[in-house]
Amino acid sequence: MDALRSLWKGTISFGLVTIPVKLYAATESKDLRFNLLHEPCHTPIQYRKYCPRCEREVEGGEIVKGYEVEQGRYVTLTDEDFESVPVMAKRTLEIVAFVRLEEIDPIYYDKTYYLEPGEGGAKAYALLRRAMEITGRVAIARVVIRSRESLAALRVFRDGVIAMETMHFPDEVRPTAGLTGITAPELRPQEIEMATGLIESLTTDFAPERFENEYRKALLDVIRAKAAGAPPALAQAAPEHGTVVDLMEALRASIAAAEGRRVAAPGVPTRTAAGRRAIPGVPGPRTGQVQPPGPPAGEPAPGGP
């Protein structure tokens, strides 16, 4: 495994305790990258930095960062200007609160990093990690990375590592008021029961190793075939999904299909198979027998009081 390259060095401020740390990107994109080519000669297209007023290409040393304060008027900033901003979080992960992980909606998460203790910080790092494990809390902090301040959540990950998720500020999350298609139609109890039954049929322990990027894998197969001069395999037509006319029948068929996949893949872990409720008219999870319809709502079951 290649050694990770540190992106940022600073300290975690934990009350009066400071922990020197190094920051590493925890994830990487596996997307396939394509060059744009000139079709007749397959030459990569160039993108030039061009000034339309001076009518010439611009060298990197001539380019500065500018903020448009009004149309056509800019204030330019240098590296020294960014460094002069009086924010503690430029070199310090300032912990401001501790919360439970389930209190944070995933919409706030941006990117994940690993934190490693710097020289002399191993014990304080281990102490913070152990205290978060015991209390079941994650730390909320402020940090500036590459001239951008973010909220951050520090949590115990695995292998003794503290992970940091940069987070959006609340004003960066778009309000939902602009969505006009959200309604509250009446739902029948039978529909709710069937929908929850489908969720139970698909419930399992999360095992990320079971998943892979199927589109990327198939696209690589196409690339390898074309590189070898072979004709690409014909893609299977995607199934058409029309408007659902009978919602109950669609739910019942979905549950049956989910149970069939579970029988075909018995190694898939599940937490709910034993306690799953019987859904009328749907094969049971273990025997495959159809559960008989229950009594109408409000009537006792046969043999009941």
Image (cartoon, grey):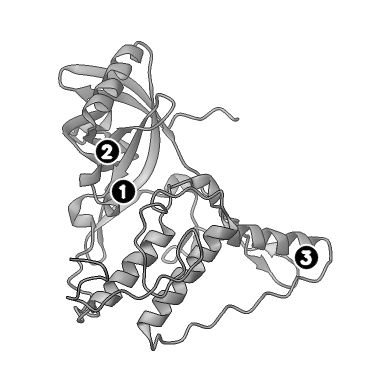
Q: Residues within 10 Å of mark 1 (few under 14, many from 20)?
A: some
The residue tagged 3 is: 226
What type is the residue that disc 3 sits on? Lys
Are the residues flagged by discs 3 and 1 in contact, CB closer than 8 Å?
A: no
What type is the residue that disc 1 sits on? Tyr
What type is the residue that disc 2 sits on? Ala
Residue name at image x 35 percent, y 10 percent: 120
Element type where label 2 sits in the image: strand
> Horizontal and vertical percent for residue 138?
24, 34
Element type where label 3 sits in the image: helix
> Horizontal and vertical percent for residue 34?
62, 60
Which of the two discs, 3 and 2, labels the residue nearer the N terminus?
A: 2
Q: Quadrant of residue 184?
A: bottom left
Query: What label sits on residue 160 in the rendered view?
Result: none
Residue at mark 3 to residue at mark 1: CA–CA distance: 39 Å
Front residue of 236 and 77: 236
Q: Is residue 60 left or right of residue 1?
A: left
Q: Residues within 10 Å of mark 2 (few under 14, many from 20)?
A: many
Quarter of the image that includes the C terminus: bottom left
Front residue of 295 and 17: 295
Residue at mark 3 to residue at mark 2: CA–CA distance: 45 Å
The residue tagged 2 is: 153
Q: Quadrant of residue 91?
A: top left
The residue tagged 1 is: 109
Q: Residues within 10 Å of mark 3 (few under 14, many from 20)?
A: few
